[in-house]
């Protein structure tokens, strides 16, 4: 799958070594790494844009291109096709993909809680729990996305069958808000800053809150590692030096998040991420930044929780043996520390 990309990389490296006058330029070109982010304005994926803003990629002599893709499942497909080398998305894709025979691993674990909330439209007070999802249209970022996984889990856990509700791909941000306003969805799963925007206008209320560790454990039964940098395992093994540099940059970023205020972090982000409400953005980040790991290390009990959640509804993992040790690695983050 990635043999052509690896060949191109090797050829570039050989050319760099052979042509001394062009050596530096060619080496830099060979080092370019494209990472697809499942919506980089979402606070759950904040480490990607923050690492760039802090200059940590450049500090590692990396040429990193961050690409934006609102739904994590589409970002995953871009990586599988070889169009990008990594994805900033949810760890659960690593388990789901192994069920399909593809080996992908989280190399830096950003968070230990999903940072997601199930919002219910204020027009639908009859929805008091996921048991009331029957016959409803439920917003998710994309079909096959982590928001869809979690939505299916909540419904099945509360007695529904998968065909008794409809998952509607509405993305995040303005498209999600419009879907609620137009009653195209009656409830939906989303992240900050969309959550705060909808609560502020009163157009939606919180049904299930997975922004904190305590809330996540109550709903999902344990620590739920979510946002991560995940990559094709073969690519990781063939490019350990580059992966180590990425881990160095992201572990430094997580340390920055852990040692700075929400206001200081927000100041480093592009102003359009605030969506016209910096105060609301900072407050949401203040309430949610404890979801980030301090060091990029996978929480020990996390993978088992994610597998248990997916096993409730996913035909990709039901009845299959998943080797959790192959869905993540701590090799690079431990060296970065």
Image (tube, rainbow, N blue to C red):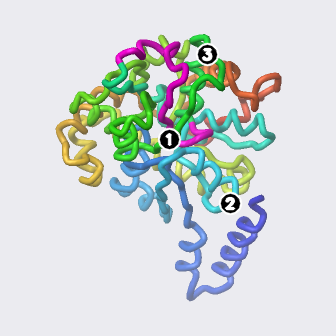
Contact check, label 3 and label 1, Cβ < 8 Å: no
Residue 181 image-quadrant placement:
top left
Q: Distance between the residues labelled 3 and 1?
A: 21 Å
Query: As rendered, which of 242 and 273 lies closer to the eye?
Result: 273
From the image, tell me which residue sits under label 3.
160
Q: How crowded is mark 3: few (under 14 residues within 10 Å), some or many (20 or more)?
A: some
| Residue 75 in view | yes
- How far across and how far down the image is residue 106, in percent? 61, 39
Q: How crowded is mark 2: few (under 14 residues within 10 Å), some or many (20 or more)?
A: some
Q: Is residue 163 left or right of residue 131?
A: right
Contact check, label 1 and label 2, Cβ < 8 Å: no
Which disc is residue 82 wearing? 2
SS class of the residue under badge 3?
loop
Q: What stretch is highlighted in magenta?
A: 125-145
Query: What's the residue at 75%, 70% (across, down)?
Result: 7
From the image, tell me which residue sits under label 1.
141
**Residue 132 lies in magenta, yes or no?**
yes
- How far across and how far down the image is residue 314, in percent? 70, 27
Query: What's the residue at 72%, 50% (across, down)?
Result: 237
Going from the N terminus, do you reach mark 3 or mark 1 first? 1
Query: What's the residue at 72%, 39% (across, down)?
Result: 97
| Residue 46 in view | no
Query: As rendered, which of 204 and 28 lies closer to the eye?
Result: 204
Which disc is residue 111 wearing? none
Task: Give the mark count.
Answer: 3
SS class of the residue under badge 1?
loop
Q: How crowded is mark 1: few (under 14 residues within 10 Å), some or many (20 or more)?
A: many
Going from the N terminus, do you reach mark 1 or mark 2 first? 2
Q: In this view, does 20 lie to the left or right of 130?
A: right
Q: In this view, does 193 lie to the left or right of 297?
A: left
Mark 3 or mark 1, whichever is nearer to me: 3
């Amino acid at each position: 799958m990635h043999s052509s990309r690896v060949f191109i990389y090797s050829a570039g490296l050989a050319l760099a070594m052979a042509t001394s006058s062009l050596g530096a330029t060619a080496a830099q070109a060979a080092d370019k790494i494209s990472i697809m982010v499942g919506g980089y304005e979402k606070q759950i994926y904040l480490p990607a844009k923050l690492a760039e803003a802090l200059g940590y990629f450049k500090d590692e002599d990396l040429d990193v291109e961050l690409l934006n893709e609102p739904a994590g499942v589409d970002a995953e497909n871009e990586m599988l096709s070889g169009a990008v080398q990594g994805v900033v998305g949810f760890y659960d894709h690593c388990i789901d993909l192994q069920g399909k025979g593809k080996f992908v691993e989280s190399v830096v674990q950003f968070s230990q809680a999903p940072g997601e909330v199930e919002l219910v439209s204020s027009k639908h007070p009859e929805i008091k729990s996921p048991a009331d999802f029957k016959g409803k249209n439920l917003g998710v970022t994309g079909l096959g996305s982590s928001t869809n996984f979690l939505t299916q889990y909540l419904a099945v856990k509360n007695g529904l069958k998968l065909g008794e509700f409809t998952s509607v791909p509405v993305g995040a941000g303005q498209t999600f808000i419009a879907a609620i306003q137009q009653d195209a969805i009656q409830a939906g799963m989303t992240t900050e800053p969309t959550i705060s925007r909808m609560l502020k206008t009163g157009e939606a209320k919180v049904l299930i809150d997975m922004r904190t560790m305590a809330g996540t454990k109550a709903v999902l039964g344990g620590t739920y590692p979510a946002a991560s940098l995940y990559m094709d395992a073969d690519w990781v093994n063939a490019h350990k030096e580059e992966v180590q540099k990425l881990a160095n940059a992201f572990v430094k970023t997580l340390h920055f998040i852990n040692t700075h205020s929400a206001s200081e972090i927000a100041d480093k982000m592009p102003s359009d991420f605030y969506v016209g409400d910096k105060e609301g953005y900072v407050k949401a980040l203040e309430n949610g930044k404890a979801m980030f790991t301090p060091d990029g290390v996978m929480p020990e009990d996390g993978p088992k929780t994610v597998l248990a959640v997916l096993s409730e509804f996913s035909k990709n993992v039901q009845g299959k043996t998943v080797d959790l040790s192959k869905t993540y690695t701590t090799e690079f983050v431990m060296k970065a520390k």
